[in-house]
DNA sequence: TTGACATATAACCAATCGGCGATATATTGG
DNA sequence: CCAATATATCGCCGATTGGTTATATGTCAA
């Protein structure tokens, strides 16, 4: 039942993946980086295994875990659909705002790369 | 304490975001796409709001929700770190992650007890 | 004002989660 | 074989989650 989205929801599990991104590690090596118990880590590892984000290889009495990053593809693809909202949109919006800012044109600095700022759209947050 | 990672862990909430990616929607419009109750949706929306992934604007008695995709940036950046594992050419990867092929070549060697074991990057991908 | 609608919040519930200590299983060294 | 080590699994626990129904709040129409 564990999807990659669920698996990476926990910060400890993300840390495990970050560690494994540097290379294969045994459970006890991983454990050294956390404050919780070994069974807790084994549980996290099981969740990551079930989600297809890591694989374990037995070497003697050690279990060497390594990253299986392809399991993150679904996440990457889903997020990529949203990337346009802060790339393309920042460009277009920035272009519009540049006119506005050009009005109070001053920006002396020298190397004139348009240093636009992201401005919040509306967001009339009042809430509660 | 709702982080973006936690917020997108739930498939219903991801669907909400997907819907809002097409444009602003009221709560009842969103509700039409789900089988659960209105309070359940309001809870999801609160979580998304707290995570900074959506914003609400009052329009009469409606609440128009819209996407605030920048909230997904942290996720995108984290995942991008892993993209290289399936994006980069295999040969580049092998170059980055040291002597994989040497370890593979010595596979039949035998009784030598190496302190450091072979790093396993495997996963020969050809497509993409 | 009243009543209907739109949405949020409250109170509750079962299931899941992340942690623990205890224990089971496998491997290695003596 | 035995003890030590490495890891997984079990049984338990309190907190969180995702859902429910009931109710509160705010706005529009009449």
Image: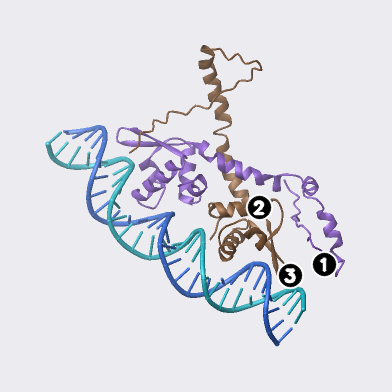
Chain colours: A brown, B purple, C cyan, D blue
* Chain to which the residue tagged by mark 2 belongs: A
Q: Could you tell whether A13 is left or right of B34 in the image?
A: right
Q: Nearer the viewer, residue A11 or B51?
A: A11
Residue D20 lies, with reference to residue D4, above or below; the image says: above
The residue shown at (52%, 20%) is A97
Residue at the image position 33 percent from the left and 36 percent from the top: B62
The earlier-in-sequence mark between 3 and 2 is: 2
Q: Which image quarter: residue C11?
A: bottom left
> Which percent across, then down, holds residue B124?
76, 54
Tag 1 residue: B113
* Mark 3 → mark 1, Cα distance in angstroms: 11 Å
- Label 2 sits on a secondary structure element that is helix
Residue ID for mark 2: A19
Q: Name the residue at 58% across, 26% down.
A: A91
SS of the residue at dot 3? loop
Residue B10 image point, x, y percent: 48, 51
| Numbered mark located on residue A60 in the image | 3
Q: Secondary structure at mark 1?
A: loop
* Label 3 to label 2: alpha-carbon separation: 22 Å
């Amino acid at each position: 039942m564990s999807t990659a989205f669920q698996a990476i929801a926990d910060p400890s599990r993300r840390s495990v993946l970050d560690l494994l991104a540097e290379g294969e590690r045994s459970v006890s090596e991983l454990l050294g980086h956390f404050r919780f118990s070994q069974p807790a880590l084994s549980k996290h590892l099981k969740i990551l295994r079930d989600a297809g984000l890591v694989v374990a290889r037995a070497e003697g009495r050690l279990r060497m875990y390594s990253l299986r990053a392809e399991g993150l593809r679904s996440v990457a693809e889903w997020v990529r659909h949203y990337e346009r909202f802060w790339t393309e949109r920042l460009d277009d919006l920035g272009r519009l705002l540049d006119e506005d800012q050009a009005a109070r044109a001053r920006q002396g600095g020298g190397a004139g790369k348009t240093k636009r700022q992201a401005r919040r759209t509306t967001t009339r947050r009042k809430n509660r």
